[in-house]
Amino acid sequence: MAVDWLLKQWLPNLSKCPKVRIACDGLSAIEMAFEDRPLSPTDAQFDLVSSIWEAIFWSSVDWSPQHVYGHLDKSNLFDELSWWEKRNLEVDGMAAEYRKELETANHLIVPNPRFFTELAALYVADTKQSRLDPQFIQECCVTLPALRSRWRDKGTISVAAESEIAWDTLGRAMRSLPAGLQGWSTKHCVGMCGTGKLKVLWGLETSAAPRFGDFKDHLHIPRCRAALATAEWDRRTAALSAWLDLQLTGPSIKTAILQLLHGVRTPTSSPLRTISPSVRPAFLVQQVIGSQGLLEGRIALSWLPLQQQHYDKIRCRRSVSLWASRLSQQLISIGFYMWEQQNSVQHSDDNVQLRERHSTANEGIHSHFDMGPDDLPKEIQPMPTSPQRVLRKSLVDKKEWLKLLCQERRDFRRSMKAQRRSLRTIFSPGP
Protein backbone atom coordinates (compact mmCIF):
# COMPACT_ATOMS: atom_id res chain seq x y z
CA MET A 1 0.00 0.00 0.00
CA ALA A 2 2.89 2.33 0.76
CA VAL A 3 4.50 1.37 -2.56
CA ASP A 4 1.28 2.12 -4.43
CA TRP A 5 1.05 5.51 -2.75
CA LEU A 6 4.68 6.34 -3.61
CA LEU A 7 4.17 5.32 -7.24
CA LYS A 8 1.15 7.60 -7.51
CA GLN A 9 3.20 10.47 -6.09
CA TRP A 10 6.37 9.95 -8.13
CA LEU A 11 5.14 8.26 -11.32
CA PRO A 12 1.46 9.11 -11.77
CA ASN A 13 1.57 8.43 -15.53
CA LEU A 14 3.42 5.12 -15.39
CA SER A 15 2.24 2.92 -18.27
CA LYS A 16 3.96 -0.37 -17.41
CA CYS A 17 3.12 -2.57 -14.43
CA PRO A 18 6.15 -2.53 -12.09
CA LYS A 19 7.22 -5.73 -10.35
CA VAL A 20 7.92 -5.65 -6.63
CA ARG A 21 9.16 -8.51 -4.46
CA ILE A 22 7.88 -8.47 -0.89
CA ALA A 23 9.36 -10.63 1.87
CA CYS A 24 8.14 -11.57 5.33
CA ASP A 25 9.53 -13.78 8.10
CA GLY A 26 6.01 -15.02 8.93
CA LEU A 27 5.32 -17.95 6.60
CA SER A 28 1.63 -18.22 7.46
CA ALA A 29 1.20 -14.45 7.04
CA ILE A 30 2.77 -14.40 3.58
CA GLU A 31 0.74 -17.44 2.53
CA MET A 32 -2.54 -15.97 3.77
CA ALA A 33 -1.88 -12.66 2.06
CA PHE A 34 -1.13 -14.15 -1.37
CA GLU A 35 -2.72 -17.59 -1.54
CA ASP A 36 -5.36 -18.21 -4.18
CA ARG A 37 -8.44 -19.57 -2.41
CA PRO A 38 -11.85 -18.36 -1.23
CA LEU A 39 -11.64 -16.43 2.04
CA SER A 40 -14.23 -17.24 4.70
CA PRO A 41 -15.33 -14.73 7.37
CA THR A 42 -14.56 -17.42 9.95
CA ASP A 43 -10.88 -17.56 8.93
CA ALA A 44 -8.37 -16.18 11.42
CA GLN A 45 -7.49 -12.50 10.86
CA PHE A 46 -10.26 -12.17 8.29
CA ASP A 47 -10.47 -8.40 8.76
CA LEU A 48 -6.79 -7.84 8.00
CA VAL A 49 -6.41 -10.47 5.29
CA SER A 50 -9.53 -9.38 3.40
CA SER A 51 -8.28 -5.79 3.37
CA ILE A 52 -4.86 -6.91 2.09
CA TRP A 53 -6.47 -9.01 -0.65
CA GLU A 54 -8.57 -6.05 -1.74
CA ALA A 55 -5.51 -3.79 -1.81
CA ILE A 56 -3.56 -6.35 -3.87
CA PHE A 57 -6.48 -6.72 -6.29
CA TRP A 58 -6.62 -2.99 -7.01
CA SER A 59 -2.87 -2.48 -6.88
CA SER A 60 -0.99 -1.32 -10.00
CA VAL A 61 1.98 -3.46 -8.94
CA ASP A 62 2.80 -7.07 -9.83
CA TRP A 63 3.68 -8.52 -6.42
CA SER A 64 6.04 -11.49 -5.83
CA PRO A 65 5.95 -12.85 -2.26
CA GLN A 66 8.97 -14.46 -0.61
CA HIS A 67 9.45 -16.07 2.79
CA VAL A 68 12.54 -15.07 4.82
CA TYR A 69 13.66 -16.79 8.02
CA GLY A 70 13.83 -14.36 10.92
CA HIS A 71 16.27 -13.87 13.81
CA LEU A 72 19.12 -15.54 11.93
CA ASP A 73 21.61 -13.13 13.56
CA LYS A 74 21.40 -15.26 16.69
CA SER A 75 23.19 -18.14 14.97
CA ASN A 76 25.03 -16.39 12.10
CA LEU A 77 27.22 -13.35 11.57
CA PHE A 78 25.46 -10.41 9.96
CA ASP A 79 27.81 -10.48 6.93
CA GLU A 80 26.95 -14.14 6.32
CA LEU A 81 23.26 -13.37 5.80
CA SER A 82 21.59 -12.85 2.44
CA TRP A 83 20.41 -9.42 1.33
CA TRP A 84 16.78 -10.27 2.23
CA GLU A 85 17.75 -11.64 5.63
CA LYS A 86 19.70 -8.45 6.42
CA ARG A 87 16.75 -6.26 5.38
CA ASN A 88 14.47 -8.33 7.59
CA LEU A 89 16.67 -7.71 10.63
CA GLU A 90 16.83 -3.98 9.87
CA VAL A 91 13.04 -3.71 9.60
CA ASP A 92 12.61 -5.65 12.86
CA GLY A 93 14.98 -3.21 14.55
CA MET A 94 13.12 -0.16 13.24
CA ALA A 95 9.79 -1.65 14.33
CA ALA A 96 11.13 -2.23 17.84
CA GLU A 97 12.38 1.36 18.06
CA TYR A 98 9.07 2.72 16.80
CA ARG A 99 7.17 0.69 19.37
CA LYS A 100 9.34 2.13 22.14
CA GLU A 101 8.47 5.64 20.93
CA LEU A 102 4.76 4.79 21.01
CA GLU A 103 5.02 3.31 24.50
CA THR A 104 6.78 6.44 25.72
CA ALA A 105 3.99 8.57 24.24
CA ASN A 106 1.27 6.24 25.67
CA HIS A 107 -0.08 5.84 22.16
CA LEU A 108 0.03 2.19 21.09
CA ILE A 109 -2.62 2.34 18.36
CA VAL A 110 -1.14 4.06 15.33
CA PRO A 111 -3.56 6.00 13.11
CA ASN A 112 -2.27 5.63 9.55
CA PRO A 113 -5.15 6.23 7.14
CA ARG A 114 -2.80 7.15 4.31
CA PHE A 115 -1.35 3.68 3.91
CA PHE A 116 -4.00 1.38 5.33
CA THR A 117 -7.70 1.41 6.12
CA GLU A 118 -9.76 -1.71 6.79
CA LEU A 119 -12.74 -2.20 4.52
CA ALA A 120 -14.97 -3.16 7.44
CA ALA A 121 -14.69 -4.14 11.07
CA LEU A 122 -16.89 -6.34 13.24
CA TYR A 123 -17.52 -5.26 16.82
CA VAL A 124 -19.23 -7.61 19.26
CA ALA A 125 -19.81 -6.53 22.86
CA ASP A 126 -17.70 -3.41 22.16
CA THR A 127 -14.73 -5.61 21.24
CA LYS A 128 -13.25 -5.69 17.73
CA GLN A 129 -13.29 -9.17 16.22
CA SER A 130 -10.60 -10.21 13.76
CA ARG A 131 -12.93 -12.86 12.32
CA LEU A 132 -16.51 -14.05 12.52
CA ASP A 133 -16.74 -16.35 15.54
CA PRO A 134 -20.31 -17.74 15.71
CA GLN A 135 -19.71 -19.40 19.07
CA PHE A 136 -18.51 -16.15 20.67
CA ILE A 137 -21.42 -14.21 19.18
CA GLN A 138 -23.82 -16.89 20.42
CA GLU A 139 -22.37 -16.60 23.92
CA CYS A 140 -22.81 -12.82 23.81
CA CYS A 141 -26.42 -13.18 22.66
CA VAL A 142 -27.23 -15.73 25.34
CA THR A 143 -25.94 -13.48 28.11
CA LEU A 144 -28.86 -11.96 29.95
CA PRO A 145 -27.84 -8.30 29.84
CA ALA A 146 -28.37 -8.29 26.07
CA LEU A 147 -31.63 -10.25 26.19
CA ARG A 148 -32.95 -8.36 29.19
CA SER A 149 -32.31 -5.04 27.47
CA ARG A 150 -34.12 -6.20 24.35
CA TRP A 151 -37.08 -7.57 26.32
CA ARG A 152 -37.36 -4.25 28.11
CA ASP A 153 -37.10 -2.16 24.92
CA LYS A 154 -39.64 -4.28 23.04
CA GLY A 155 -42.11 -4.41 25.93
CA THR A 156 -41.83 -8.19 26.27
CA ILE A 157 -41.57 -7.84 30.04
CA SER A 158 -43.48 -5.27 32.06
CA VAL A 159 -41.92 -3.00 34.66
CA ALA A 160 -43.80 -4.89 37.37
CA ALA A 161 -42.52 -8.26 36.13
CA GLU A 162 -38.87 -7.26 35.65
CA SER A 163 -38.15 -6.78 39.34
CA GLU A 164 -39.76 -10.14 40.21
CA ILE A 165 -37.82 -12.39 37.81
CA ALA A 166 -34.96 -14.58 39.06
CA TRP A 167 -32.43 -13.20 36.57
CA ASP A 168 -29.39 -15.00 37.98
CA THR A 169 -31.28 -18.26 37.75
CA LEU A 170 -32.26 -17.64 34.14
CA GLY A 171 -28.70 -16.66 33.21
CA ARG A 172 -27.34 -19.86 34.70
CA ALA A 173 -30.04 -21.89 32.95
CA MET A 174 -29.34 -20.43 29.51
CA ARG A 175 -25.60 -20.98 29.84
CA SER A 176 -26.27 -24.61 30.78
CA LEU A 177 -28.52 -25.39 27.83
CA PRO A 178 -27.12 -27.60 25.04
CA ALA A 179 -25.60 -25.55 22.20
CA GLY A 180 -28.45 -26.30 19.80
CA LEU A 181 -31.09 -25.37 22.34
CA GLN A 182 -29.16 -22.20 23.20
CA GLY A 183 -29.38 -21.07 19.59
CA TRP A 184 -33.07 -21.90 19.36
CA SER A 185 -33.84 -20.21 22.68
CA THR A 186 -31.96 -17.04 21.75
CA LYS A 187 -33.75 -16.73 18.40
CA HIS A 188 -37.16 -17.27 19.94
CA CYS A 189 -36.53 -14.99 22.89
CA VAL A 190 -35.90 -12.10 20.48
CA GLY A 191 -38.85 -13.04 18.26
CA MET A 192 -36.93 -14.49 15.28
CA CYS A 193 -39.28 -17.40 14.67
CA GLY A 194 -41.99 -18.49 12.24
CA THR A 195 -44.90 -16.44 13.59
CA GLY A 196 -46.99 -13.50 12.47
CA LYS A 197 -45.29 -10.83 10.40
CA LEU A 198 -42.00 -12.74 10.14
CA LYS A 199 -43.71 -15.46 8.11
CA VAL A 200 -44.81 -12.76 5.68
CA LEU A 201 -41.33 -11.20 5.60
CA TRP A 202 -39.86 -14.62 4.83
CA GLY A 203 -42.04 -14.81 1.73
CA LEU A 204 -44.51 -17.40 2.98
CA GLU A 205 -48.02 -17.26 1.58
CA THR A 206 -49.73 -16.74 4.93
CA SER A 207 -49.05 -16.13 8.61
CA ALA A 208 -51.71 -18.66 9.60
CA ALA A 209 -51.00 -21.82 11.56
CA PRO A 210 -50.70 -24.96 9.40
CA ARG A 211 -53.50 -27.05 10.91
CA PHE A 212 -56.59 -24.87 11.39
CA GLY A 213 -55.59 -21.59 9.76
CA ASP A 214 -55.60 -19.55 13.01
CA PHE A 215 -53.23 -16.60 13.36
CA LYS A 216 -49.92 -18.04 14.48
CA ASP A 217 -48.21 -16.21 17.33
CA HIS A 218 -45.90 -17.45 20.11
CA LEU A 219 -48.70 -18.67 22.34
CA HIS A 220 -50.57 -20.42 19.55
CA ILE A 221 -47.89 -23.14 19.67
CA PRO A 222 -48.58 -24.38 23.24
CA ARG A 223 -52.32 -23.71 22.85
CA CYS A 224 -52.83 -25.59 19.59
CA ARG A 225 -55.79 -27.98 20.02
CA ALA A 226 -54.77 -30.53 17.41
CA ALA A 227 -54.64 -34.11 18.67
CA LEU A 228 -50.89 -34.48 18.09
CA ALA A 229 -50.16 -31.15 19.80
CA THR A 230 -52.33 -32.12 22.77
CA ALA A 231 -50.55 -35.46 23.07
CA GLU A 232 -47.15 -33.74 22.95
CA TRP A 233 -48.20 -31.24 25.61
CA ASP A 234 -49.49 -33.99 27.89
CA ARG A 235 -46.28 -35.96 27.41
CA ARG A 236 -44.06 -32.98 28.24
CA THR A 237 -46.04 -31.85 31.29
CA ALA A 238 -46.07 -35.44 32.58
CA ALA A 239 -42.29 -35.52 32.18
CA LEU A 240 -42.02 -32.23 34.10
CA SER A 241 -44.22 -33.63 36.88
CA ALA A 242 -41.92 -36.64 37.20
CA TRP A 243 -38.88 -34.34 37.20
CA LEU A 244 -40.35 -32.20 39.99
CA ASP A 245 -40.83 -35.32 42.10
CA LEU A 246 -37.28 -36.45 41.37
CA GLN A 247 -35.94 -33.07 42.52
CA LEU A 248 -37.92 -33.27 45.79
CA THR A 249 -40.01 -30.23 44.90
CA GLY A 250 -42.47 -29.09 47.55
CA PRO A 251 -45.94 -30.56 46.83
CA SER A 252 -47.66 -27.18 46.93
CA ILE A 253 -44.97 -25.70 44.65
CA LYS A 254 -45.37 -28.58 42.21
CA THR A 255 -49.14 -28.13 42.13
CA ALA A 256 -48.77 -24.40 41.52
CA ILE A 257 -46.24 -24.83 38.68
CA LEU A 258 -48.34 -27.47 36.93
CA GLN A 259 -51.41 -25.26 37.37
CA LEU A 260 -49.53 -22.37 35.77
CA LEU A 261 -48.73 -24.60 32.80
CA HIS A 262 -52.40 -25.55 32.61
CA GLY A 263 -53.13 -21.82 32.50
CA VAL A 264 -50.82 -21.46 29.49
CA ARG A 265 -52.93 -24.04 27.68
CA THR A 266 -56.28 -22.79 29.00
CA PRO A 267 -55.88 -19.08 29.83
CA THR A 268 -59.55 -18.59 30.79
CA SER A 269 -59.34 -20.95 33.77
CA SER A 270 -59.12 -19.44 37.28
CA PRO A 271 -57.25 -22.02 39.37
CA LEU A 272 -56.30 -19.83 42.36
CA ARG A 273 -58.64 -21.67 44.72
CA THR A 274 -56.65 -24.88 44.24
CA ILE A 275 -53.36 -23.20 45.20
CA SER A 276 -52.01 -23.44 48.74
CA PRO A 277 -52.10 -20.06 50.56
CA SER A 278 -48.37 -20.34 51.29
CA VAL A 279 -47.43 -20.25 47.59
CA ARG A 280 -50.19 -17.94 46.30
CA PRO A 281 -47.98 -14.82 46.32
CA ALA A 282 -45.39 -16.58 44.12
CA PHE A 283 -48.19 -17.95 41.93
CA LEU A 284 -49.63 -14.46 41.38
CA VAL A 285 -46.19 -13.01 40.63
CA GLN A 286 -45.60 -15.73 38.03
CA GLN A 287 -48.90 -14.81 36.41
CA VAL A 288 -47.66 -11.21 36.14
CA ILE A 289 -44.53 -12.50 34.36
CA GLY A 290 -46.89 -14.20 31.90
CA SER A 291 -47.35 -17.42 29.98
CA GLN A 292 -44.73 -16.62 27.36
CA GLY A 293 -42.24 -15.76 30.10
CA LEU A 294 -42.92 -19.08 31.82
CA LEU A 295 -42.08 -21.08 28.68
CA GLU A 296 -38.96 -18.95 28.15
CA GLY A 297 -37.69 -19.90 31.61
CA ARG A 298 -38.41 -16.62 33.41
CA ILE A 299 -39.47 -17.89 36.82
CA ALA A 300 -40.33 -15.72 39.81
CA LEU A 301 -37.64 -15.06 42.40
CA SER A 302 -40.14 -15.85 45.15
CA TRP A 303 -40.12 -19.58 44.29
CA LEU A 304 -36.59 -20.01 45.63
CA PRO A 305 -37.20 -19.27 49.35
CA LEU A 306 -40.33 -21.44 49.25
CA GLN A 307 -38.36 -24.40 47.89
CA GLN A 308 -35.56 -23.70 50.37
CA GLN A 309 -38.09 -23.91 53.21
CA HIS A 310 -39.21 -27.30 51.90
CA TYR A 311 -35.61 -28.54 51.68
CA ASP A 312 -35.01 -27.39 55.25
CA LYS A 313 -38.19 -29.12 56.37
CA ILE A 314 -37.18 -32.49 54.91
CA ARG A 315 -33.52 -31.92 55.89
CA CYS A 316 -32.29 -31.96 52.31
CA ARG A 317 -29.00 -30.23 51.52
CA ARG A 318 -29.61 -29.80 47.82
CA SER A 319 -28.94 -26.43 46.19
CA VAL A 320 -32.11 -24.42 45.65
CA SER A 321 -30.39 -22.23 43.03
CA LEU A 322 -29.52 -25.37 41.03
CA TRP A 323 -33.13 -26.55 41.38
CA ALA A 324 -34.39 -23.22 40.04
CA SER A 325 -31.89 -23.18 37.16
CA ARG A 326 -32.87 -26.67 36.09
CA LEU A 327 -36.55 -25.80 36.40
CA SER A 328 -35.98 -22.94 33.94
CA GLN A 329 -34.29 -25.37 31.56
CA GLN A 330 -37.20 -27.78 31.84
CA LEU A 331 -39.70 -25.03 31.02
CA ILE A 332 -37.64 -23.86 28.04
CA SER A 333 -37.48 -27.42 26.72
CA ILE A 334 -41.30 -27.72 26.88
CA GLY A 335 -41.57 -24.70 24.59
CA PHE A 336 -38.89 -26.14 22.31
CA TYR A 337 -40.57 -29.52 21.90
CA MET A 338 -43.94 -27.92 21.23
CA TRP A 339 -42.31 -25.91 18.43
CA GLU A 340 -40.63 -29.05 17.11
CA GLN A 341 -44.00 -30.78 17.01
CA GLN A 342 -45.56 -27.80 15.22
CA ASN A 343 -42.74 -27.68 12.67
CA SER A 344 -43.17 -31.37 11.90
CA VAL A 345 -46.68 -30.57 10.67
CA GLN A 346 -45.46 -28.04 8.12
CA HIS A 347 -44.98 -30.69 5.41
CA SER A 348 -47.37 -33.35 6.69
CA ASP A 349 -50.91 -34.28 5.67
CA ASP A 350 -52.13 -32.59 8.87
CA ASN A 351 -51.34 -29.19 7.34
CA VAL A 352 -54.64 -27.66 6.20
CA GLN A 353 -52.89 -25.14 3.94
CA LEU A 354 -50.92 -27.93 2.30
CA ARG A 355 -54.11 -29.91 1.78
CA GLU A 356 -55.74 -26.88 0.15
CA ARG A 357 -52.77 -26.42 -2.19
CA HIS A 358 -52.87 -30.13 -3.10
CA SER A 359 -56.61 -29.84 -3.75
CA THR A 360 -56.14 -26.80 -6.01
CA ALA A 361 -53.35 -28.56 -7.91
CA ASN A 362 -55.47 -31.72 -8.29
CA GLU A 363 -58.37 -29.70 -9.71
CA GLY A 364 -56.02 -28.12 -12.22
CA ILE A 365 -54.66 -31.54 -13.21
CA HIS A 366 -58.17 -32.96 -13.70
CA SER A 367 -59.15 -29.98 -15.86
CA HIS A 368 -56.12 -30.53 -18.11
CA PHE A 369 -57.05 -34.19 -18.55
CA ASP A 370 -60.62 -33.15 -19.37
CA MET A 371 -59.31 -30.79 -22.08
CA GLY A 372 -57.39 -33.65 -23.68
CA PRO A 373 -54.16 -33.48 -25.69
CA ASP A 374 -55.50 -31.90 -28.90
CA ASP A 375 -54.14 -28.40 -28.28
CA LEU A 376 -50.71 -29.59 -27.19
CA PRO A 377 -47.55 -30.08 -29.26
CA LYS A 378 -47.13 -33.67 -30.46
CA GLU A 379 -44.01 -34.27 -28.36
CA ILE A 380 -45.86 -33.72 -25.05
CA GLN A 381 -49.32 -35.04 -26.02
CA PRO A 382 -48.64 -38.30 -24.07
CA MET A 383 -48.33 -36.31 -20.81
CA PRO A 384 -52.07 -36.01 -20.01
CA THR A 385 -52.81 -39.73 -20.47
CA SER A 386 -52.41 -41.17 -16.95
CA PRO A 387 -54.11 -39.01 -14.27
CA GLN A 388 -53.38 -41.34 -11.35
CA ARG A 389 -49.65 -41.24 -12.02
CA VAL A 390 -49.65 -37.43 -11.99
CA LEU A 391 -51.87 -37.19 -8.90
CA ARG A 392 -49.39 -39.32 -6.94
CA LYS A 393 -46.62 -36.77 -7.49
CA SER A 394 -45.42 -34.32 -4.84
CA LEU A 395 -46.93 -30.84 -4.68
CA VAL A 396 -43.80 -29.32 -6.23
CA ASP A 397 -43.90 -31.78 -9.14
CA LYS A 398 -47.64 -31.19 -9.61
CA LYS A 399 -47.08 -27.44 -9.84
CA GLU A 400 -44.26 -27.91 -12.37
CA TRP A 401 -46.46 -30.27 -14.42
CA LEU A 402 -49.29 -27.72 -14.44
CA LYS A 403 -46.94 -24.87 -15.26
CA LEU A 404 -45.51 -26.76 -18.24
CA LEU A 405 -48.88 -27.77 -19.69
CA CYS A 406 -50.42 -24.31 -19.19
CA GLN A 407 -47.48 -22.71 -20.97
CA GLU A 408 -47.54 -25.25 -23.81
CA ARG A 409 -51.29 -24.81 -24.33
CA ARG A 410 -50.92 -21.01 -24.42
CA ASP A 411 -48.04 -21.24 -26.89
CA PHE A 412 -49.87 -23.75 -29.09
CA ARG A 413 -53.07 -21.67 -29.16
CA ARG A 414 -51.09 -18.51 -29.88
CA SER A 415 -49.33 -20.31 -32.74
CA MET A 416 -52.62 -21.57 -34.18
CA LYS A 417 -54.11 -18.07 -34.06
CA ALA A 418 -51.08 -16.72 -35.89
CA GLN A 419 -51.41 -19.44 -38.55
CA ARG A 420 -55.12 -18.66 -39.03
CA ARG A 421 -54.34 -14.96 -39.46
CA SER A 422 -51.73 -15.83 -42.05
CA LEU A 423 -54.13 -18.10 -43.93
CA ARG A 424 -56.83 -15.43 -43.91
CA THR A 425 -54.34 -12.96 -45.32
CA ILE A 426 -53.35 -15.39 -48.08
CA PHE A 427 -56.84 -16.60 -49.10
CA SER A 428 -58.92 -13.50 -48.45
CA PRO A 429 -60.13 -11.87 -51.69
CA GLY A 430 -58.24 -8.80 -52.71
CA PRO A 431 -59.74 -5.33 -53.04
Image (spheres, rainbow, N blue to C red):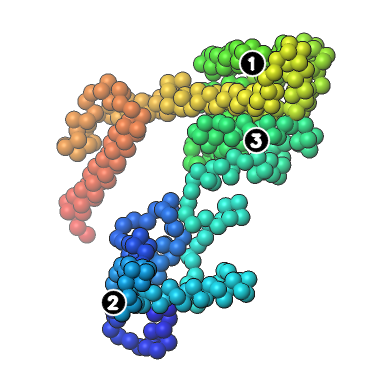
- Image quadrant in which the N terminus is located: bottom left
Label at residue 38: none
Q: Which residue is mark 1?
A: 247
| Residue drawn where x is 30% and y is 26% of the image | 393
Q: In the shown orientation, is residue 2 left or right of residue 262?
A: left
For residue 156, above or below residue 259: below
Say which quarter of the image contains residue 65.
bottom left
Q: Which residue is mark 2?
A: 80
Q: Earlier in the sequence, mark 2 or mark 3?
A: 2
Q: Is residue 364 visible?
A: no
| Residue drawn where x is 38% and y is 84% of the image | 7
For residue 323, above or below residue 250: below
CA separation in Å, label 2 and label 1? 75 Å
| Residue drawn where x is 68% and y is 31% of the image | 169
Q: Earlier in the sequence, mark 3 or mark 1?
A: 3
Q: Which residue is mark 3?
A: 171
Of the residues tagged 2 and 1, which is closer to the observer?
A: 2
Secondary element at image label 3? helix
For residue 320, above or below residue 73: above
Secondary element at image label 1? loop
